[in-house]
Image (tube, rainbow, N blue to C red):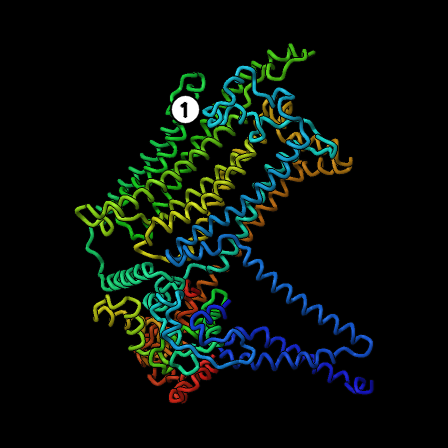
Amino acid sequence: DSEEESMSEGEMERLKEEVEEKKKVIAIMRNKPWRMKRRLVHLKECQEFVDKFEGALGKGKGRKFYAYKVMMTKKWIKFQRDFENFKTTCIPWERKIKEVESHFGSSVASYFIFLRWMYGMNMVLFGLTFGLVVIPEVLMGLPYGSIPRKTVPRAEQPTAQDYSVLMDFNGYCKYSVLFYGYYNNQRTIGLLKFRLPLSYLMVGVGTFGYSLMVVIRTMAKNADVGGGDGDDGEFTFAWKMFTSWDYLIGNAETADNKYASITTSFKESIVDEQENQKDENIHLRRFLRVLANFMIICCLGGSGYLIFFVVKRSQEFANRDDLSWYEKNELELIMSLLGLVCPPLFETIAELEEYHPRIALKWQLGRIFALFLGNLYTFLFALFDEVNNKKEYYANFTLYNNDTDTTPPPMDPSDVIRGPCWETAVGIEFVKLTVSDIQVTYLTILIGDFARAVIVRFLNYCWCWDLEATYPSYGEFDISGNVLGLVFNQGMIWMGAFYAPGLVGINVLRLLSSMYYQCWAVMATNVPHERVFKASKSNNFYMGLLLLILFLSLLPVVYTIMTLPPSFDCGPFSGKAKMFDVIMETIDLDLPAFLGTLMGYAANPGLIIPAVLLMVLAIYYLNSVSEAYQHANAELKKKMQMARDEEKNRRNNTESTDQVMKDLEDLLPNRSLLPPAPPPETGAGEHHTFTSNVNEPLAPIVQCR
Amino acid sequence: MLHGRFHELAPHLVPLDYTNQPDIRLPLALIVSMPELKENPFRNRIVEVFSEDGQGNLSFNDFVDMFSALCETAPRELKTIYAFKIYDFNVDNFLCKEDLEKTLNRLTKGELTPEEVNLVCSKAMEEADLDGDSKLSFSDFENMISKAPDFLR
């Protein structure tokens, strides 16, 4: 006891500090460029010290508790480390993706990483939808066949089980849990009083909210890692030399391609460097570019009109019964074909423009994006046009129905006349579009890549020219096409999920099978790109596209919820004037009274307008602050550049780079007023003394830092 | 796991039990046959840098060192230091013109003409050399690399 008392407060403090220091050393040990041996020795030393004195720091009665606390902390750290290891092994498909990466480079692998990320997000959406909407309806709602909306009408019953009808998502599929029309509008169902309509609306809105949150979080993370746009021409050659090799390549063929691409890139830079201003006809170039843009706008307009025309035709077809397979699927076929044919067309036209390849790629992506967007929105407008037409027909219908509504005679549910359920129809259209998109993609891979590879491989033995080396050879993996396809597919899912809850499930299956299928296809039938390039800042570009698509797919759904009246006799909102009336109903009936009055105050325009104004002001303020930071950044960069140039020239004893000073040099009273060359850097000096000491290469580098 | 890889390079040499800290070193030729390093143009230099004797014979500690530095989660400064050592072919703690030329030839497998090689090396030297001694010291190298957008691989 006397020993413990003899340790004064000051000594305790000192010991504590030392223990903390040793702990810090242990933590940063892995960052130091020491040899393992030295590291191990130091580590042991520090750990022994910590063990010895940590226990001694607890005094008297508190000692046992302190030791216990220390032990628990250690156990917790160990548990955390084990959990981290476990989490790493749990990441799905990691090995597969690494394999693709080593064969094809990091850019192709980035597509698969993006696919995996999408799969994760879709799984969460699937869980939300199924857990909160589908399962309650299946378990606690009325079973199939009990009420009119859940039963196949008598007229359709004979054909309801036919394969062709099911493939079109009519028949039994249409009156199932997959689509909006099946859900009942009972306010609460089952023993637990689960409020299905409210949950349906909330899940619909929550889908967008969650997706938005996840996309923005990923963008922020990517922006952090990538940093701002690196300096353009500062260290071109040096960077090319030291950073162009992709250390993750483990395959001979990829390595060969990488060598070739590095060589090409050097040659390009050399040519850039040696080139003088090209003696070009600026006017011809401009004219050609305007012409190319004009042609492309014509193409885009043409494709939009084509889709509109086809949708109108499909409306006419809906009234006829004797349709050939082509006529039934015309809309989906046309849309998929446009997506296949137009991008190569754009590329060919773009050759007129003679842009730098990187800029040309950006234009190409932008144009394909505009194409898909135009198609999607034309499709939507045509669809909503159809919906509006249906509403007229069915406004008449409700008028007719109201007369006989008072005492409905007990009828078999399949005999009840019901109105057209436009939400289900829209849902069916989206599902058909998604399914046909999946089919087209898989077929393209099968024919375009696999069949091509098989033909090239086996026909090569008996063909005149070398099929493998020249045309057609094996296909390359089209990264941007695939990523854009994925992004647009997700947009369609977001739009359609509100009208067809089963769509999310279909998409999850699609992503899962896509992962395996495309991994196999890439490894078996593709060759690495000729220009193997690194996936650096493009990740945020694709995330930005995803964000844009998210907003664009939000608009139709919000419009539906806020403006369009729901169908009279199908779906969870039937009977209400607008879909969001469910929320008002819930506030009135379920929540305590004061919350209702609170919401009433909050919805008051007198409160909302100032809130909106405040937000606008906040945005303006943040914008100007960020601009100011950008200015400051640019200034600092310029200063650094100037300082560096000055330094360089001072070393070389040449004239000042500052042009103004140069001009004024003659005015200077005395040449010797120019600052003398300062003494050499301490680092350089130390280097010279240590050059001869080859056995200790580490020390000067460490000291220099 | 790393120990397993090390062991399978030379099963008869590497003991499974390391508690006695045996001093087993594997020669360069064995290490560069590993699939991760096989295609790397700088594989010999990498192994030499991490070996204690500078000849490429790696003990297990050196082996772990090497892979931890090549790992994705290694800090940038660590990678910078090792990168400098790898590219320094004549081990004089400077990157002189010959070092640059050797690096370039390894990267392009000799596809560039001598004039092109010369031009590229002079340009690179000009860009990165701050103290004007026509050699790149570590501080020049670090300054240049720290601004590179895709160095981390």
Q: How many marks?
A: 1
Q: Secondary structure at mark 1?
A: helix
Chain containing the residue with disc 1: A
> Residue A637, how many percent across, how many down?
43, 66
* Residue B144, horizontal then vertical, whole percent: 39, 70
Asked if one can make out residue A679 in the rendered structure from this viewpoint, the answer is no
Which residue is drawn at the image coordinates 77% and 37% (left, top)?
A594
* Left or right of A520 on screen, residue A124: right
Q: Identify the image quadrant of the N terminus of chain A.
A: bottom right
From this viewpoint, which residue is outermost toward the left? A464
- Vertical placement of A541 versus A636: above or below? above
- In the image, residue A204 sits, relative to residue A362, either above or below, namely above
The percent coordinates of residue A631 (x first, y second) are 46, 60
Camera-side residue: A674 or A187? Answer: A187
Q: Residue at x 58, y 26 (%)?
A: A181
Quarter location, residue A698: bottom left
Amino acid type at mark 1? Lys
What residue is at 46 percent from the left and 29 percent from the top?
A381
Mark 1, residue position:
A328
Residue B42 lies, in percent from the top left, at: 35, 71
Q: Nearer the viewer, residue A677 or B20?
A: B20
Give the side of residue A343 with respect to residue A380, left or right: left
User: Which residue, as the protein is rendered here, is positioned at the far front?
Assistant: B12
Between residue A360 and residue B99, name the one nearer to us: B99
B99 vs A623, left or right, is left
Can residue A511 be seen from the camera position used here?
yes
Dot 1 crowding, Cα within 10 Å, few <14, some 14–19, many 20+: some
Residue A384, compared with residue A667, is above or below; it is above
